[in-house]
Image (tube, helix red, strand yellow):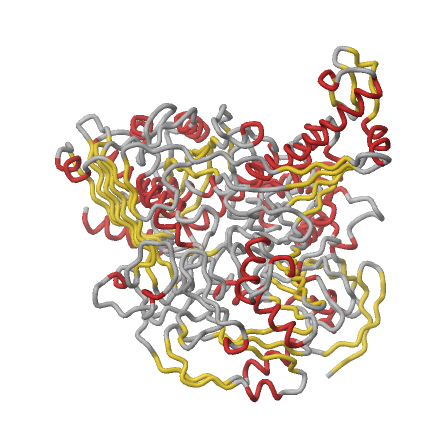
Amino acid sequence: MTATPTATKPAPRFVRADGPDKVTGSGRYTADLTLTGALAAKFKYADVTHARITKLDVSAARAMPGVFAVLTQADVPSVKFGPFVQDRTLFADGTVRFEGEIIAAVAAVDAATADRAVAAIVVEYSPLPVVNDIEGALAADSPLVHAEWADYGSILVRDRNDASFASIAKGDVEQGLASSHLVVTSRYVADGCHAAPIEPRAVVAQWEGNKVTIWTSTQVPFDARAGVCETLELPNNRVRIIVPHLGGGFGGKCGFHYEAHVAALARVAKRPVRLVFSRREEFVAPDRRREGIVYEFHTGVDADGRIVARKAWLAIDNGAYTADAGFFSQLAAMHALGPYRIPNALAEAHLVYTNHQPSGSVRAPTAPQTCWALESHTDEVARAIGLDPVAFRTLNAVDTGAEGPSGQTYGEIGVQQCIEAAAAGAGYGNPLPDDEAIGVAIGWWPSFSVPSGAYVKIDGDGSGQIITGAQECGTGAVMTLRQLAADELGMDPEDFELVYQDTSVAPYDMGATGSQTLFNNGRAVVAAAGQIAEQLRNLAADRLEASPADIVLADGTASVAGSPDRGVPIAELAGIAAGGELLIGHGSGMPPGPPPTVGSTCVGDLGMSAWVAPQFSCHAVRVKLDRDTGVARVMHVSAAHDSGTIINPIGAQGQVEGAVLMGIGQALTEGTTYDDQGRQRNAALLEYKLQTAADAPPIAVHFVEINTPDAGPRGAKGLAEAPNVATAAAISNALAQLVGAPVRQLPMTAERVWTALTEQAAQS
Amino acid sequence: MSESIHLTVNGVAYPVTVDQGRNLLSVIRTEIGLTGTKEGCDDCECGACMVLLDGQPVNSCSYLAVQAQGRAITTVEGLADGDALNVLQRNLLETGGVQCGFCTPGMLLSATALLDRTPNPSDEEVRIGLSGNLCRCTGYAKIVAAVQLTAAELRNG
């Protein structure tokens, strides 16, 4: 299917259940909530990036009229937390390690009073040497970001500033490189960037007795609950997380953030407390920034252009604390090898502490920038051996039955079909003006197989509710659950309302992260609805004097197979059930286990080297370059995806279009720059440019739908992250043709492109 | 210094007492109690706070409430025709132009102003008309399609 910005009307098959709330303004987001007596929360940030606190005095702030609570680390349990390395506390504990570190939190009668109280907090520092360079941090004589690193609890392979080392090795890479016909060596550097959801985060907390309810703009309510419980030492059943409508996340609102700070303030203040972030805070404070990475690649090919060996080395910017980035080293190592047949492979990745804002899962973490680097390198290899970039990928990419770089042998996959479809959709090979070129790149991404739960009930009037732990962040994945339940029960999606985003109401789900909602919660909803289907069949069999096995549920009616006139409306059966055994289903289902790998060894293994139901993509992007200024404009994107069966076509297309545009931003304009102290220099939307409607090119979307083993409901894989992977890489490969050499730093800003053009001109 | 003024929002006059330095956005959201208008940056960069003043799109985060006296203010809550969605709201929903929904109110108001002054816009005019409203979810294609669909429906009566 092809999406073009013309006035063609798609079939309105999946109008979002939350849509009317969102187009009328009646939908409430967290910052829209008010509670009687609520106080405003503000944080005192470190502003310096590495220092020992020599004095911290909050007495003047506490004494101010209208101030109800001022908290520091001394006022909360002494708990170090972190999913992979327990290296962090709620408030700075003697040392600050990045500019957005929280020194203290204030709750006051209004925001202006809270701001004055924050300004009255006295902090004095003794400076420590700033670690501002990713590679330099790995040097033996580098200052340490965490002098006490060896004492932290962790499951990772660590050494000083190296917070997580991982490798994937197969065959003999040195021998493979030595025996290659030619070897290409490349270096690339990706700057960090941001998720930048349009809704800044907000948290509201209210205590009643010993229980707290927290409304928060999180993508992961159960993870947020776990963080509150761990740091404030509370049992799960006394903390209730509710997410109102969520204004986008893109990974930026994953993890546990400020729920505990606000809950702690509310407990001391004995009032509800409300925190709303400014745009600057949204840039500077969260531990969810896309990581900068330094890459070195060596790829050896034989005389026919077949890959013989690939060696990759990566240094990933962890920032000051290890949020969920612990698994990035192994994931990035996979992306650095890529979806290729490589008999001899070695990828080594270091996750490196610096005094930058901490990194964390932003849409397909590590993948877009690693794909950008690897696929730019791949075009260098293709050029060196004299092969067309598409032909090189067709020759070397994995395929059904082929073995990938980590020793996983794939079932049916669609990467080759993606290459063909994307190239065709871009008109690859057709003549172009000399200021335009088409670049091609392939990418991949896992489906995450994890536990998940849902309830389904049908009340006496025949209307249904899906009560799910799943979280909707805008993708429509939760909205699609209605279709699955309806199909299972022979009902209409409109018959179901969704009850979601409340940890005290629904069973566990991992949240809007890892593109996993449909894959896992879909399985749960189908299982829950299946229990009700069985109840309905039994009720109908009694009523129609037939066998339950012969009852068909379709079009709102339970009827006998082969005798459509012998039927009873499901609503009538629901009325009968309301006077007896109620129609209640619960589901989870067993997530598929990891596929095996053969012949590879992984140090620092976190289960990321073998992927259930892997997704593949190819993007072919036409770029126009103004050689006088270095300004690049994306003219057209052709995106082909194997994400399994597409259940919600409008939603799926929207995911690809949105992710591609995010990829264009990452390619050309979105990159964080730091000053010499590791502070962000462009923490605002004027200095950090997102793509606008006027920048956006036509995007043609093609789904390769194949029969995937171990997929989710009806053969669906994940989707939301995969289309963010290959866009920047394809743009790079178009630019390299126009410039005459790769632009080796991401984002490929006009200045960097112009510099590369100038260097090329000097060489020729 | 506070001032007692009347603000007319979606055809209803609201008496409010506001500090002269207050922006229109916070008064609409707090005193008037209409939270459909969003704050995304407080710096005129994202367009989430867009409202119409006498039909002209304005970032209400950077406009003083006292300046809006005597003007007709339209927010997203004023678009629907009673309980029925207007044609633009319906098309935005049906084309898939709504994902997280946070930019949606501002986007709807920009599009309303655009269609009001340009009933037969080119795709380029739509894209430029919406370029003050950042959307991080959709890639804009479905939003542009919804505006074009609405233009066609309005032209054909």
Q: Is residue B85 left or right of residue B125?
A: right
Residue at the image position 62 percent from the left and 59 percent from the top:
A216
The part of the image, by quadrant, that contains residue A199 is bottom right
Q: Is residue A298 left or right of residue A726?
A: left
Indicate whether A582 appears above or below B33: above
The part of the image, by quadrant, that contains residue A497 is top right
Q: Is residue A433 left or right of residue A117?
A: left
Front residue (pair A455, A349): A455
Give x and y (percent) for residue B75. Answer: 74, 57
Indicate whether A668 appears above or below A115: above
Furthest-left residue in this view:
A178
Front residue (pair A704, B143): A704
Give x and y (percent) for residue A143. Answer: 27, 70
Front residue (pair B26, A243): A243
Q: Is residue A150 left or right of residue A560?
A: left
Residue A438 in view? no
Give x and y (percent) for residue A109. Answer: 68, 78
